[in-house]
Amino acid sequence: MWVPLVAGAVTLVFTTVLTIAGVGAAFILIPVFLALGVDVHTAMATALLLNAVAMSVASVTFVRNRLVVWNVAVPILVVAAILSPLGAWVSHLLDRNLLLWMFVGFLLFAALMMLFYTPRPRQRAAGLRTALSLGAGVGALAGFVGGLLGVGGGNIIVPALVALGFEPKKASATTSFIVIFSSLSGFLGHVSLAGMNAPLLAFTVAGSAAGAAAGAWLMTEKLRSRQVKVVIGIVLLAIAAKMAWSLVR
């Protein structure tokens, strides 16, 4: 019984922090679950389901506070879903390690941008045509690169939106909504390969929901935009460090 308890506590902590950044916690939870002795496919399926649970809970708060930019979120979601399989197909033709090192470089650049660069904020809300164009462009990048490298698109979408001048809280909230569907898609792919561990699922879902609620509250009520940018930058650095470590060990 100690494994589900520890997994639930870890899920609570990481989900709280990563919800502020608008990305799911699966990339951290999967290696934690594996270290606790959970089967690899069960770990992946559980972590991706937790992403969907956490971002669904958080999105309720974000939608209520009108932080989700719908006319950008929908085209990102649609175009990313279309181009992700293409990226996955192209990945078989290229050297994966080289691609991953390039992505580590992108994450470092994006993290430094979040921490030290202040892009010019958008002076007014984008019109429908502009929003659709921006959303389609970011969705194409996130979907293709995400499929190419087998990583979540959230860590691409957030810095891209901020670089385009979107307020960090809205960039994070918009990405959270998109992550729901990308995580559910990944979950359905992995759950067919493994059974679910009921105690693990119960404790981690509770931790995920509580962490998402706490993270969404902190992001909307307690943190300023600059602080949200710092959290996003630190999260991107952590993702880059984890990927680099997995490549060199």
Image (cartoon, rainbow, N blue to C red):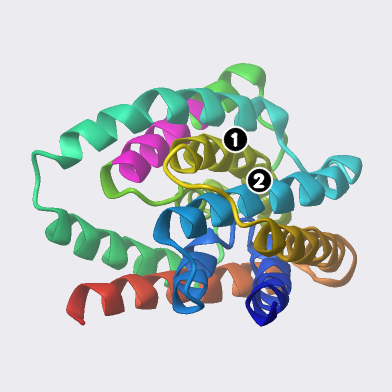
Looking at the image, residue 151 lies above or below residue 180 = below
Residue 155 at x, y percent in the picture: 48, 56
Q: Is residue 189 above or below residue 246?
A: above
> Residue 142: x and y, percent?
41, 41
Mark toward the start of the polypeptide (2 vs 1): 2
Direction from residue 191 to residue 231 in the image, left or right: right
Badge 2 vs badge 1, beta-carbon distance below 8 Å: yes
Q: Of all residues shown, which one is farthest toward the top? A: 129
Label number found at residue 52? 2
Q: At 50% across and 60% down in the image, what residue appears? A: 43
Relative side of 209 to 102, left or right = right
Provide the residue span drawn in magenta. Answer: 135-147
- Predominant secondary structure in magenta? helix
Vertical relation: 209 (above or below) 15? above
**Figure quadrant of residue 46:** bottom right
Relative to the observer, which residue lies in front, 207 or 161? 207
Question: Which circle marks residue 119 in the picture?
Answer: none
Q: Please state which amino acid type lies under the numbered disc 2.
A: Ala
Q: Quadrant of residue 223?
A: bottom right
